Amino acid sequence: MPWPWISPILEDNPYSRLRFSGEALPTLFRIAHDEYHNTEIVTEIVSFSKILGPGMRLAFVKGSEVLIERMCSWQQKVNVTPDCVSQRVAAHFLKEGYMNPHLSMVCDFYRPYLERMLAAMSQYLPPYIQYSKPEGGIFTWLWLPEDMNADLLFEQAKKHKVTFIPGSKFYPSGQEKHNCLRLNFSFSSLEQIDTGIAALGSLMHEFYA
Ligand SMILES: Cc1ncc(COP(=O)(O)O)c(C=O)c1O
Protein backbone atom coordinates (compact mmCIF):
# COMPACT_ATOMS: atom_id res chain seq x y z
CA MET A 1 0.00 0.00 0.00
CA PRO A 2 1.58 3.34 -1.00
CA TRP A 3 2.15 5.93 1.71
CA PRO A 4 1.97 9.15 -0.28
CA TRP A 5 1.30 11.29 2.77
CA ILE A 6 4.34 10.22 4.80
CA SER A 7 7.94 11.14 4.02
CA PRO A 8 10.47 8.32 4.29
CA ILE A 9 12.13 8.10 7.69
CA LEU A 10 15.83 7.48 8.18
CA GLU A 11 16.34 5.95 11.63
CA ASP A 12 19.90 6.61 12.77
CA ASN A 13 20.11 4.06 15.54
CA PRO A 14 23.56 3.23 16.93
CA TYR A 15 22.45 3.05 20.60
CA SER A 16 19.08 1.38 21.19
CA ARG A 17 20.55 -2.13 21.40
CA LEU A 18 22.49 -1.02 24.47
CA ARG A 19 19.69 -1.45 26.99
CA PHE A 20 20.53 -1.94 30.67
CA SER A 21 17.13 -1.97 32.35
CA GLY A 22 13.45 -1.37 31.72
CA GLU A 23 11.36 -2.46 28.80
CA ALA A 24 13.10 -2.93 25.43
CA LEU A 25 11.69 -0.24 23.15
CA PRO A 26 10.78 -1.10 19.55
CA THR A 27 12.68 0.61 16.76
CA LEU A 28 10.73 2.73 14.26
CA PHE A 29 11.59 0.07 11.69
CA ARG A 30 10.03 -2.62 13.92
CA ILE A 31 6.85 -0.54 14.47
CA ALA A 32 6.49 0.07 10.72
CA HIS A 33 7.09 -3.62 10.04
CA ASP A 34 4.92 -5.17 12.76
CA GLU A 35 2.09 -2.67 13.07
CA TYR A 36 1.85 -1.27 9.54
CA HIS A 37 3.35 -4.22 7.57
CA ASN A 38 5.53 -1.73 5.79
CA THR A 39 9.26 -2.35 5.25
CA GLU A 40 9.81 0.64 2.96
CA ILE A 41 8.88 3.69 4.96
CA VAL A 42 11.59 3.40 7.62
CA THR A 43 15.22 2.69 6.80
CA GLU A 44 17.21 1.89 9.93
CA ILE A 45 20.97 2.35 10.05
CA VAL A 46 22.79 0.56 12.87
CA SER A 47 26.45 1.42 13.29
CA PHE A 48 28.65 -1.32 14.72
CA SER A 49 30.74 1.39 16.39
CA LYS A 50 29.03 1.26 19.78
CA ILE A 51 28.19 -2.44 19.87
CA LEU A 52 31.06 -4.30 18.18
CA GLY A 53 34.07 -2.13 17.38
CA PRO A 54 34.47 1.56 16.46
CA GLY A 55 37.55 0.83 14.34
CA MET A 56 35.59 -1.48 12.04
CA ARG A 57 33.87 1.56 10.48
CA LEU A 58 30.86 -0.59 9.59
CA ALA A 59 27.10 -0.43 9.89
CA PHE A 60 24.14 -2.43 8.71
CA VAL A 61 20.95 -1.12 7.15
CA LYS A 62 17.38 -2.42 7.14
CA GLY A 63 14.59 -0.99 5.02
CA SER A 64 13.87 0.14 1.49
CA GLU A 65 15.84 -1.92 -1.04
CA VAL A 66 15.94 0.93 -3.53
CA LEU A 67 17.39 3.26 -0.91
CA ILE A 68 19.88 0.66 0.34
CA GLU A 69 21.14 0.02 -3.22
CA ARG A 70 21.73 3.74 -3.65
CA MET A 71 23.42 3.99 -0.27
CA CYS A 72 25.77 1.10 -1.19
CA SER A 73 26.58 2.63 -4.53
CA TRP A 74 27.29 6.01 -2.94
CA GLN A 75 29.34 4.42 -0.16
CA GLN A 76 31.48 2.62 -2.79
CA LYS A 77 32.09 5.92 -4.54
CA VAL A 78 33.16 7.61 -1.32
CA ASN A 79 35.31 4.78 0.08
CA VAL A 80 36.48 3.33 -3.25
CA THR A 81 37.30 -0.01 -1.59
CA PRO A 82 35.36 -0.76 1.59
CA ASP A 83 37.21 -3.11 3.96
CA CYS A 84 35.99 -6.55 2.83
CA VAL A 85 37.72 -8.41 5.65
CA SER A 86 35.90 -6.60 8.46
CA GLN A 87 32.65 -6.82 6.49
CA ARG A 88 33.05 -10.60 6.30
CA VAL A 89 33.99 -10.88 9.96
CA ALA A 90 30.88 -8.86 10.96
CA ALA A 91 28.63 -10.84 8.60
CA HIS A 92 29.94 -14.12 10.03
CA PHE A 93 29.46 -12.81 13.57
CA LEU A 94 25.80 -12.03 12.84
CA LYS A 95 25.15 -15.22 10.86
CA GLU A 96 26.53 -17.46 13.61
CA GLY A 97 24.23 -15.80 16.18
CA TYR A 98 27.01 -14.26 18.26
CA MET A 99 25.48 -10.77 18.35
CA ASN A 100 22.76 -11.24 20.97
CA PRO A 101 25.01 -12.92 23.57
CA HIS A 102 27.64 -10.29 22.81
CA LEU A 103 25.13 -7.47 23.35
CA SER A 104 24.08 -8.88 26.67
CA MET A 105 27.78 -9.05 27.70
CA VAL A 106 28.34 -5.45 26.55
CA CYS A 107 25.28 -4.30 28.54
CA ASP A 108 26.52 -6.13 31.65
CA PHE A 109 29.85 -4.37 31.15
CA TYR A 110 28.42 -0.84 30.78
CA ARG A 111 25.61 -1.03 33.37
CA PRO A 112 27.91 -0.29 36.37
CA TYR A 113 29.25 2.78 34.54
CA LEU A 114 25.78 4.22 34.19
CA GLU A 115 25.00 3.36 37.82
CA ARG A 116 28.21 5.06 38.98
CA MET A 117 27.49 8.13 36.85
CA LEU A 118 23.96 8.47 38.28
CA ALA A 119 25.22 7.95 41.84
CA ALA A 120 27.98 10.55 41.35
CA MET A 121 25.55 13.05 39.81
CA SER A 122 23.16 12.64 42.71
CA GLN A 123 26.04 13.12 45.19
CA TYR A 124 27.99 15.97 43.59
CA LEU A 125 25.80 18.04 41.28
CA PRO A 126 24.01 21.10 42.68
CA PRO A 127 20.27 20.58 43.28
CA TYR A 128 19.31 23.03 40.51
CA ILE A 129 20.80 20.71 37.84
CA GLN A 130 18.32 18.30 36.27
CA TYR A 131 19.47 15.20 34.46
CA SER A 132 18.12 12.22 32.57
CA LYS A 133 18.29 8.73 34.09
CA PRO A 134 18.68 6.65 30.96
CA GLU A 135 17.98 2.92 30.75
CA GLY A 136 20.40 2.45 27.88
CA GLY A 137 22.84 4.11 25.50
CA ILE A 138 26.09 5.74 26.60
CA PHE A 139 25.06 9.30 27.56
CA THR A 140 23.16 11.35 30.11
CA TRP A 141 21.63 14.73 29.32
CA LEU A 142 21.80 17.61 31.79
CA TRP A 143 19.57 20.69 32.02
CA LEU A 144 21.08 23.71 33.72
CA PRO A 145 19.17 26.79 34.93
CA GLU A 146 18.00 29.00 32.00
CA ASP A 147 20.71 31.59 32.62
CA MET A 148 23.61 29.13 32.92
CA ASN A 149 25.55 28.74 29.70
CA ALA A 150 27.09 25.29 29.08
CA ASP A 151 29.33 26.61 26.28
CA LEU A 152 31.01 28.97 28.77
CA LEU A 153 31.06 26.27 31.46
CA PHE A 154 32.83 24.00 28.96
CA GLU A 155 35.69 26.50 28.59
CA GLN A 156 36.16 26.52 32.37
CA ALA A 157 35.77 22.75 32.71
CA LYS A 158 38.46 22.07 30.07
CA LYS A 159 41.00 23.89 32.23
CA HIS A 160 40.19 21.38 35.00
CA LYS A 161 40.49 18.41 32.62
CA VAL A 162 36.73 17.77 32.56
CA THR A 163 35.04 17.74 29.17
CA PHE A 164 31.55 17.23 27.83
CA ILE A 165 29.64 18.19 24.72
CA PRO A 166 27.74 21.47 25.19
CA GLY A 167 24.10 20.85 24.33
CA SER A 168 24.05 23.70 21.80
CA LYS A 169 25.99 21.47 19.39
CA PHE A 170 22.91 19.26 18.98
CA TYR A 171 20.55 21.99 17.79
CA PRO A 172 20.08 23.37 14.27
CA SER A 173 22.09 26.56 13.86
CA GLY A 174 20.15 29.61 14.96
CA GLN A 175 17.93 27.55 17.31
CA GLU A 176 20.53 26.53 19.90
CA LYS A 177 19.76 26.07 23.57
CA HIS A 178 22.76 26.89 25.75
CA ASN A 179 21.62 25.60 29.15
CA CYS A 180 22.17 21.90 28.50
CA LEU A 181 24.99 19.43 27.99
CA ARG A 182 25.72 15.78 27.23
CA LEU A 183 27.90 13.54 29.39
CA ASN A 184 29.34 10.20 28.31
CA PHE A 185 29.66 7.35 30.81
CA SER A 186 31.16 4.56 28.67
CA PHE A 187 34.72 5.81 28.21
CA SER A 188 36.12 6.83 31.59
CA SER A 189 36.95 4.44 34.43
CA LEU A 190 34.60 4.24 37.44
CA GLU A 191 37.12 6.25 39.48
CA GLN A 192 37.41 8.89 36.74
CA ILE A 193 33.61 9.19 36.66
CA ASP A 194 33.63 10.02 40.39
CA THR A 195 36.51 12.48 40.09
CA GLY A 196 35.09 14.10 36.95
CA ILE A 197 31.56 14.56 38.29
CA ALA A 198 32.87 15.88 41.64
CA ALA A 199 35.00 18.43 39.72
CA LEU A 200 32.08 19.36 37.47
CA GLY A 201 29.82 19.78 40.51
CA SER A 202 32.23 22.23 42.19
CA LEU A 203 32.71 24.13 38.93
CA MET A 204 28.95 24.47 38.57
CA HIS A 205 28.71 25.82 42.13
CA GLU A 206 31.46 28.38 41.42
CA PHE A 207 30.14 29.23 37.99
CA TYR A 208 26.60 29.84 39.21
CA ALA A 209 27.51 31.59 42.46
C1 LIG B 1 23.54 9.33 16.59
C2 LIG B 1 24.78 8.79 15.90
N1 LIG B 1 24.66 8.28 14.66
C3 LIG B 1 25.72 7.79 14.00
C4 LIG B 1 26.98 7.77 14.57
C5 LIG B 1 28.09 7.31 13.70
O1 LIG B 1 28.76 6.21 14.09
P1 LIG B 1 30.01 5.73 13.26
O2 LIG B 1 30.41 6.77 12.27
O3 LIG B 1 31.07 5.51 14.28
O4 LIG B 1 29.56 4.47 12.60
C6 LIG B 1 27.16 8.28 15.86
C7 LIG B 1 28.48 8.28 16.47
O5 LIG B 1 28.79 8.74 17.51
C8 LIG B 1 26.02 8.82 16.54
O6 LIG B 1 26.12 9.33 17.78
Image (spheres, rainbow, N blue to C red):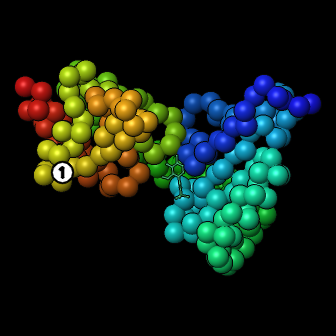
Q: Which residue is drawn at 31% across and 40% down?
A: 166
Query: Seen from this angle, which residue lies furthest front?
Result: 174
In the image, taking residue 69 as reference, residue 131 lies left or right, namely left
| Residue 73 figure quarter | bottom right
Task: In this rendered view, identify the residue nearer to me: 124 or 180.
Answer: 180
Q: What x and y, as percent, mark residue 23? A: 62, 30
**How many numbered badges does the structure rendering display?**
1
Q: Is residue 198 visible?
A: no
**What residue type is disc 1 on?**
Lys
Q: Which residue is drawn at 21% across and 49% down?
A: 162
Q: Does the residue labelled 1 lie within 8 Å of ligand 1?
A: no
In the image, taking residue 7 as reference, residue 102 lies left or right, namely left
In the image, taking residue 203 as reference, residue 142 lies left or right, namely right
| Residue 129 figure quarter | top left
Q: Residue at x 43, y 36 (%)?
A: 172
Badge 1 crowding class, 10 Å Cα cut-off, few under 14, some 14 to 19, many 20 or more, is: few
Q: Is mark 1 on a helix, strand or loop?
A: helix
Query: Seen from this angle, which residue lies furthest right?
Result: 1
Q: What x and y, as percent, mark residue 51? A: 57, 56
Q: Quadrant of the C terminus?
A: top left
| 9 up-or-down from 195: above or below | above
| 135 up-or-down from 84: above or below | above
Question: Residue tagged by mark 1?
Answer: 158
Q: What x and y, as percent, mark residue 126? A: 19, 26
Task: In this rendered view, identify the residue nearer to me: 87 or 116.
Answer: 87
Task: In this rendered view, identify the residue nearer to me: 151 or 193.
Answer: 151
Q: Is residue 11 visible?
A: yes
Q: Which residue is drawn at 32% across and 55% down?
A: 189
Q: What x and y, as percent, mark residue 61? A: 72, 53
Q: Quadrant of the N terminus?
A: top right
